[in-house]
Amino acid sequence: GFSTISVSAAPDTSGNAGGILLNTPNLKLDDNAEINSFSDGKGNGGSIDIGTNVASMTNNSSIFFFFFEARGGNINFNVRDGLALFNNSKITAESSGNNPGDNGGNITIKGNPGKLNWLSLIDSKLLAQANRGHGGVIDLYADKFTISNSQIDVSSRGGFNGSLFINSFRLQETVFPQRQPLGGGRLLTSRCSSFSKENLSRFIITARDILP
């Protein structure tokens, strides 16, 4: 078996799913462990709020919202030191609803206060996707951000794609390894680079003393 912390809403209900508030000095999820909120009804997602000094997720562990007929919820990580995801672990806030308002949820990972010291995403996923609604927002604040063979996705099948913000002094590896590598030097010399079409996702790097 595996360990789970879960709140849910039953089918054919209209109430919102509950939230989860977790504060602990150290958080470790391993071997398919889960923290989740999901709904088979029409109510919207609540929030998963986690405060910790250091956190690790390994071996298919997950923290997620999933809603079949409603908006996704929000996942907020406040980490004083660092957060690492390894070996097919994931943090997701998704909606498969068929209504235009069934948007993906939002994922925020930041320090307490400001930026966390390090964030590692290795063979893992951060997802805020939607089916008919808009994609969600993923907002990351880390002094050092390392990513390898991983996926970050805020897309939508039927609505506008969401937004991705990465605020990091040291970004290692490419954010989308399977696509054309992003030239960091070109971003810094142009001082502000982002897509303007509203149906495209936004990828923004904020570096020390260089702002749009």
Image (tube, rainbow, N blue to C red):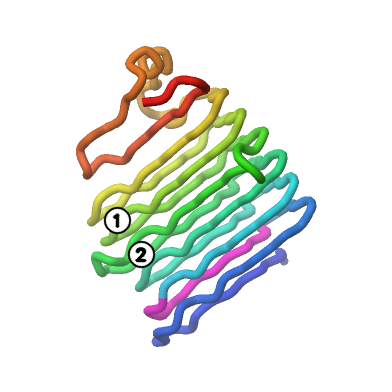
Name the residue beneath numbered marker 1: 134
Instruction: Count neighbours of disc 2 (C-alpha within 10 A) and say few if under 14, some if 14 to 19, many if 20 or more.
Output: many
Q: What is the secondary structure assignment of the residue under circle 1?
A: loop
Instruction: Count neighbours of disc 1 (C-alpha within 10 A) and say few if under 14, some if 14 to 19, many if 20 or more.
Output: many
> Nearer the viewer's eye, disc 2 or disc 1?
1
Q: Is residue 60 left or right of residue 133?
A: right
Is 133 drawn above or below residue 166 in the view shown? below
Whichever of callouts 2 and 1 sits on the residue coming sooner in the sequence is 2
Q: What is the secondary structure assignment of the residue under circle 2?
A: loop
Residue 157 falls inside the magenta stretch: no
Q: Is the N terminus in the top left, top right, bottom left or bottom right quadrant?
A: bottom right
The residue at the point 50 percent across, 69 percent down is 46
How far across and down, in percent of the image, does residue 71 sit? Answer: 38, 67
* Magenta highlight range: 32-43
The quadrant in which residue 141 appears is top right
Residue 34 falls inside the magenta stretch: yes
Is 145 drawn above or below residue 139 in the view shown? above
**Disc on res. 96:** 2
How far across and down, in percent of the image, does residue 99 sit? Answer: 25, 69
Disc 1 residue type (three-letter): His
Residue 18 showing in the rendered view: yes
Q: Is residue 98 left or right of residue 41?
A: left
Is 103 drawn above or below residue 53 in the view shown? below
The residue at the point 54 percent across, 29 percent down is 168
How far across and down, in percent of the image, does residue 112 sit? Answer: 66, 45
In three-dimensional space, the C-alpha distance between marks 2 and 1, rounded to whole angstroms, equals: 11 Å
**Disc on res. 53:** none
The quadrant in which residue 122 appears is top right
